[in-house]
């Protein structure tokens, strides 16, 4: 539980249960580090942030694994049918996940502001912290009862001195110094990126709760043969998107291959598959949160050689005006995304809503 940083090997002790040394070491082991101007102390702080992500993911994975056995406490909508700041009905596990991550980030000592999809405003968790956390604690929470994979999304920013909590949490996506997601499925996987192309690493949790390095250079294929979005909405899509989907379904796209559809309706699950097999995943409606979902995934996509767009512009260039702003999102293989954007007219407006 000791971490070493700096040119002369400054050593700092971390109280139990910090562990997660493989994850923490990514900060000093990446050649494409985004936080080039961070001081040695701040780099050590970022290592603690990544360790906190891993430990909170471990705790949440254990809660998810036993949720069906504690259905009254963990499954279903939150008390009183409460809605989160984005207007979605909160599930009990949304609240549990938010509390777990908030507690771990506060305890690590390196986080100043904690901004969550589940809370109206960023919370001050440590006055002396150097980083801002933007998090969707439990993506796909409505899938829990039927055991479909779910995830956590995290973006990490350096604090801006003198800026308000909201200003700190609504920086441009490209200002992130790290981002990651946890994927809770047959195995619990953690994918972290700390910089540009070449910095995405994949970890798998062992039976003792330690995340071990499984892939030190996660790469998204430049072209795939799978698209991932809700085909049931086909008739509501704009003409550009409908014509593109019709073409790739029938082998009339640039690759000449006939594409297949794969859709979990868990953003982390769909994106994780896309990173491994190529293609793209997304939603043409302005449905996904810029700060909590689009920005961290765009950062990871770039680090893995992929690309993310809202259908017009690169997500990494977006600077949200509000904390809970939404956007269309398409992300995955660079050549597939380029072909989609070139088609044009792929963003669906927000006038149509769907009740489930």
Image (cartoon, rainbow, N blue to C red):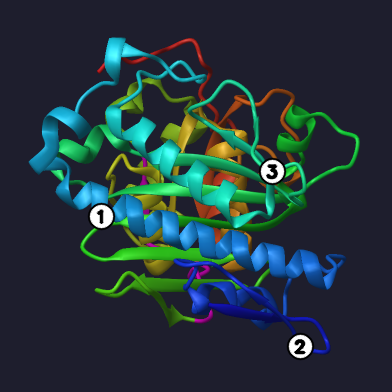
Q: Specify the farthest residue to the right.
A: 162
Q: CA distance from mark 1 to mark 3?
A: 27 Å
* Label 3: few (<14), some (14–19) or many (≥20) C-alpha neighbours in 10 Å: some
The residue range painted magenta reads 216-229
* Label 1: few (<14), some (14–19) or many (≥20) C-alpha neighbours in 10 Å: some
Residue 304 at what x, y percent from top left? 56, 68
Towards the viewer: 16 or 171:
16
Image marks 3 and 2: residues in contact by CB distance under 8 Å: no
**Mark on residue 62?**
1
Q: CA distance from mark 1 to mark 2?
A: 35 Å
**Mark on residue 9?**
2
As drawn, is 330 to the left or to the right of 227? right
Quadrant for the C terminus in the image? top left
Q: Of discs 1 and 3, which sits in the foreground?
A: 3
As drawn, is 205 to the left or to the right of 145? right
Towards the viewer: 242 or 287:
287
Q: Quadrant of residue 190?
A: bottom left
The local secondary structure at tag 3 comes to loop
Q: Residue at x 26, y 66 (%)?
A: 187
The local secondary structure at tag 1 comes to helix
The local secondary structure at tag 2 comes to loop
Q: CA distance from mark 3 to mark 2?
A: 26 Å
Residue 177 at what x, y percent from top left? 72, 58
Q: Earlier in the sequence, mark 1 or mark 3?
A: 1
Q: Earlier in the sequence, mark 1 or mark 2?
A: 2
Q: Residue at x 52, y 78 (%)?
A: 21
**Mark on residue 209?**
none
Q: Would you say the magenta stretch is mainly helix, strand or loop?
A: loop
Q: Quadrant of residue 345?
A: top right
As drawn, is 178 to the left or to the right of 154? right
Q: Earlier in the sequence, mark 3 or mark 2?
A: 2
Task: Identify the residue position indicated by label 3 in the image.
Answer: 126
């Amino acid at each position: 539980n000791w971490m070493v940083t700096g040119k002369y090997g400054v050593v700092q002790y971390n109280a139990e249960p910090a562990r997660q040394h493989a994850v923490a070491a990514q900060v000093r082991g990446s050649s494409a580090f985004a936080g080039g101007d961070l001081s040695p102390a701040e780099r050590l702080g970022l290592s603690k942030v990544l360790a906190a992500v891993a430990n909170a993911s471990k705790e949440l994975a254990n809660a998810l694994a036993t949720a069906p056995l504690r259905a009254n406490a963990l499954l279903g909508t939150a008390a009183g049918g409460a809605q989160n700041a984005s207007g979605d009905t909160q599930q009990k596990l949304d609240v549990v996940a938010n509390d777990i991550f908030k507690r771990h980030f506060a305890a690590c000592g390196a986080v100043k502001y904690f901004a969550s999809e589940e809370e109206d405003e960023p919370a001050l968790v440590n006055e002396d912290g150097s980083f801002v956390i933007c998090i969707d604690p439990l993506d796909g929470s409505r899938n829990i009862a039927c055991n479909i994979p779910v995830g956590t999304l995290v973006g990490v920013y350096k604090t801006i001195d003198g800026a308000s909590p909201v200003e700190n949490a609504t920086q441009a996506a490209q200002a992130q110094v790290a981002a990651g997601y946890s994927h809770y499925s047959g195995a619990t996987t953690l994918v972290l990126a700390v910089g540009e192309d070449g910095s995405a690493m994949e970890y798998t949790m062992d039976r003792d709760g330690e995340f071990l390095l499984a892939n030190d250079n996660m790469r998204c294929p430049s072209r795939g043969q799978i698209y991932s979005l809700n085909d049931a909405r086909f008739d509501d899509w704009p003409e550009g998107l409908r014509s593109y989907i019709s073409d790739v379904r029938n082998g009339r796209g640039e690759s000449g291959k006939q594409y297949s559809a794969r859709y979990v309706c868990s953003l982390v699950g769909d994106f994780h598959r896309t990173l491994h097999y190529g293609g793209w995943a997304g939603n043409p409606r302005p449905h996904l949160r810029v700060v909590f979902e689009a920005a961290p995934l765009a950062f990871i996509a770039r680090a893995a050689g992929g690309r993310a767009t809202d259908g017009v512009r690169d997500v990494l260039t977006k600077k949200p005006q509000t904390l809970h702003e939404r956007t269309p999102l398409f992300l995955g293989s660079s050549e597939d995304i380029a072909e989609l954007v070139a088609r044009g007219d792929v963003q669906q407006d927000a006038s149509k809503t769907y009740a489930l």
